[in-house]
Image: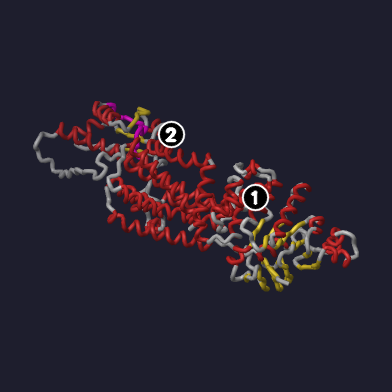
């Protein structure tokens, strides 16, 4: 099995506070990996370390084969990232955003042109191409944001609560996009609060108070905890959590 | 290089999309350059003068009419009691009291000397100083007139008189505007460049868009250059507008070479933009950046030599002003525009500001962290 993410006792401390506590896991190439946990469990911190946005305090990790301490710029060439906050430029149009992000990842003008046409077609945003991103509804923004994050065909895409505040229909469409990306061989690393979404993942890990308490396929986890839904698995584990915000 | 092109494209799009800011950038300097030099004027006129005349003689009348005829003073009170004059000062109706003692004319004619008393309201230091000086000059003049009348001509009177004739170089008519306009333009360029750049990276932090940049393979110096160049272009546009206004409105045509002027302005812009970007990398919110810039701008402007001469500052302040890029711009603007200084003359200032530009931008690049 080929692993695209490998961590060993990866830890991040902020002063006395241990946000992420010695987490060890692997993510296989091409899988959809769900990263679950209550608010404040340390999911975002872990993800930011893997993306090269945050310096680990200790432990080791490689992403796409590159070291998170020394080779962050190589990592950044090989990943896509969609943060919790919407982070495309609101004062640029849909097309301008696509062009800019395609450009800084080194796509050629021709590639940018064909890819943005495909993307607009796929998202049904053809008529909105020349509209400012600020004017789009949240669900559309999130879908656009995801498409931009995978525009340069990264090996891995990191999604931090991509469907927060989005209606169920749009969430469903969003997951269609994720499956499509996955089918193209992009590994998906996604954090979420929605347990129905957890069911869509190949494997999931559940973080509690900075530690990974469970890691397996949704089906195995349910039988392990002898419950019927992921909701119950989550409750079993997160009930003991001491920190939340 | 290609990355920078995309960054520039994006920055310019954002700048041109924000019409309010764009209008500010273009209209503000033009308006201020037209209005401020008219108002910010050191020439003190309309000094309110209260005369307390105890003499009521023809000489005292002559003196008073000579003072009021000068155009600098406005007679706001004419009393026989000092107390009355003082009241006018207290109620802010007078800035100066000229007290003419009893027997003014008699003593002048008979004894050949007489004392006058001037009381100055020193709350407004500039007005008081200049007002006192003007009044002194007028009285001395009056004195000379009387001597010519009273003393027989050609008779040696024992006192040596040194007369001073001066010629004002480079600004022969001592036109205040010639001195002020280049300085105000320097400050406008500084303010616009400094604030725009200081707010820019912080804005990306506030909106969260910087995350998307930080997670991309953009090089740090590309990112900073992508921010620097658009504002540098805008700064030069503002500078050009300013020069046009000074030419069209005030008839100020740079005596020196325009290329030299632009060369210096360009290097200066790199320095002040670098400073703004540096502040931007240290701040988390636009509010913080705004206040920090405000703090430095006040120092830059008040210690830049526009309003007060750096030469008359205390030693420590002179040292501080050596680190003030704005003081170099104001100095060079005046040198090149009014004196026609050449590249060789401004070389020390140019290299200092160039060094500032280098250090500040390198510091900004160093302090901009893609990972924390």
Label 1: which residue? A119
User: Residue B53 lies in magenta, yes or no?
Assistant: yes
Of A144 and B80, nearer the camera is: A144
Q: Let me know if residue A41 appears in the view.
A: no
Which dot, 1 or 2, sits closer to the camera?
1
Q: List x then y, in percent, for residue A34.
A: 76, 61
- How many numbered marks, from 0 up? 2
User: Residue B184 lies in magenta, yes or no?
Assistant: no
Q: List x then y, in percent, for residue B76.
A: 37, 28
Q: List x then y, in percent, for residue A119.
A: 65, 50
User: On what subunit does the disc labeled 2 rest?
Assistant: B
Q: Quadrant of residue B61?
A: top left
Report the quarter where the C terminus of chain B lies: bottom right
Q: Quadrant of residue B368?
A: bottom right
Q: Let me know if residue B28 appears in the view.
A: yes
Left or right: residue B154 compared with residue B220: left
Residue sitting at the far left:
B154
Q: Residue at x 45, y 38 (%)?
A: B27
Label 2: which residue? B92
What span is in magenta?
A: B41-56
Left or right: residue A205 compared with residue A226: left
Q: Secondary structure at mark 1?
A: helix
Q: Secondary structure at mark 2?
A: loop
Whether labels 1 and 2 belong to a single chain: the reply is no
Q: Which mark is residue A226?
A: none
């Amino acid at each position: 099995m080929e692993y695209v993410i490998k961590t060993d006792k990866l830890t991040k401390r902020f002063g006395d506070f241990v946000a992420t506590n010695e987490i060890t896991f692997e993510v296989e190439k091409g899988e959809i990996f769900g990263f679950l946990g209550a608010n404040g469990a340390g999911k975002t911190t872990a993800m930011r370390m893997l993306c090269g946005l945050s310096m680990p305090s200790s432990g080791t990790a490689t992403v796409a084969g590159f070291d998170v301490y020394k080779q962050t710029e190589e990592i950044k060439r090989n990943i896509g990232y969609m943060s919790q906050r919407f982070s495309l430029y609101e004062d640029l149009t849909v097309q301008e955003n696509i062009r800019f992000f395609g450009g800084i990842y080194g796509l050629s003008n021709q590639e940018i042109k064909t890819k943005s046409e495909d993307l607009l077609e796929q998202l049904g945003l053809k008529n909105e191409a020349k509209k400012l991103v600020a004017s789009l509804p949240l669900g559309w923004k999130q879908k656009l944001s995801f498409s931009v994050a995978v525009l340069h065909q990264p090996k891995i895409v990191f999604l931090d609560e991509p469907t927060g505040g989005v209606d169920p229909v749009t969430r469903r469409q969003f997951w269609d996009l994720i499956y499509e990306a996955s089918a193209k061989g992009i590994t998906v690393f996604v954090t979420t609060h929605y347990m129905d979404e957890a069911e869509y993942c190949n494997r999931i890990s559940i973080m509690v108070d900075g530690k990974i308490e469970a890691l397996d396929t949704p089906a195995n986890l349910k039988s392990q905890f002898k419950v019927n839904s992921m909701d119950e698995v989550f409750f079993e584990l997160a009930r003991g959590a001491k920190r939340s915000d | 290089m290609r990355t920078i092109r995309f960054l520039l494209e994006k920055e310019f799009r954002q700048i041109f999309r924000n019409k309010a800011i764009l209008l500010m950038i273009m209209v503000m300097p033009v308006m201020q350059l037209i209005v401020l030099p008219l108002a910010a004027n050191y020439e003190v006129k309309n000094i309110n003068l209260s005369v307390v005349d105890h003499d009521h003689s023809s000489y005292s009348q002559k003196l008073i009419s000579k003072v009021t005829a000068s155009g600098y003073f406005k007679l706001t009170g004419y009393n026989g009691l000092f107390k009355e004059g003082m009241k006018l000062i207290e109620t802010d109706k007078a800035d100066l009291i000229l007290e003419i003692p009893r027997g003014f004319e008699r003593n002048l004619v008979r004894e050949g000397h007489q004392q006058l008393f001037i009381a100055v309201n020193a709350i407004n230091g500039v007005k008081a100083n200049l007002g006192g000086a003007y009044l002194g000059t007028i009285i001395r003049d009056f004195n000379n007139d009387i001597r010519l009348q009273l003393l027989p001509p050609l008779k040696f009177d024992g006192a040596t008189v040194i007369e001073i004739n001066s010629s004002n170089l480079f600004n022969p008519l001592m036109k205040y505007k010639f001195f002020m306009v280049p300085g105000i333009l320097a400050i406008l360029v500084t303010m616009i460049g400094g604030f725009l750049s200081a707010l820019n990276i912080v804005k990306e932090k506030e909106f969260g868009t910087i995350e998307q940049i930080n997670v991309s393979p953009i090089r740090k110096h590309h990112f900073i250059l992508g921010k620097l160049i658009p504002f540098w272009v805008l700064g030069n546009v503002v500078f050009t507008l300013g020069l046009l206004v000074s030419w069209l409105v005030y008839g100020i045509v740079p005596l020196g070479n325009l290329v030299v002027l632009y060369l210096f302005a360009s290097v200066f812009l790199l320095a002040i933009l670098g400073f703004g970007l540096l502040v931007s990398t240290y701040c988390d919110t636009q509010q913080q950046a705004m206040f920090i810039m405000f703090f430095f701008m006040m120092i830059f402007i008040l210690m830049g030599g526009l309003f007060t001469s750096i030469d008359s500052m205390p030693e420590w302040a002179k040292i501080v002003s050596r680190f003030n890029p704005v003081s170099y711009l104001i100095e060079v603007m005046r040198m090149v525009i009014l004196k026609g200084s050449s590249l060789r003359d401004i070389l020390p200032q140019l290299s200092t500001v160039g060094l500032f530009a280098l250090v500040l931008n390198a510091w900004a690049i160093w302090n901009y962290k893609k990972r924390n």
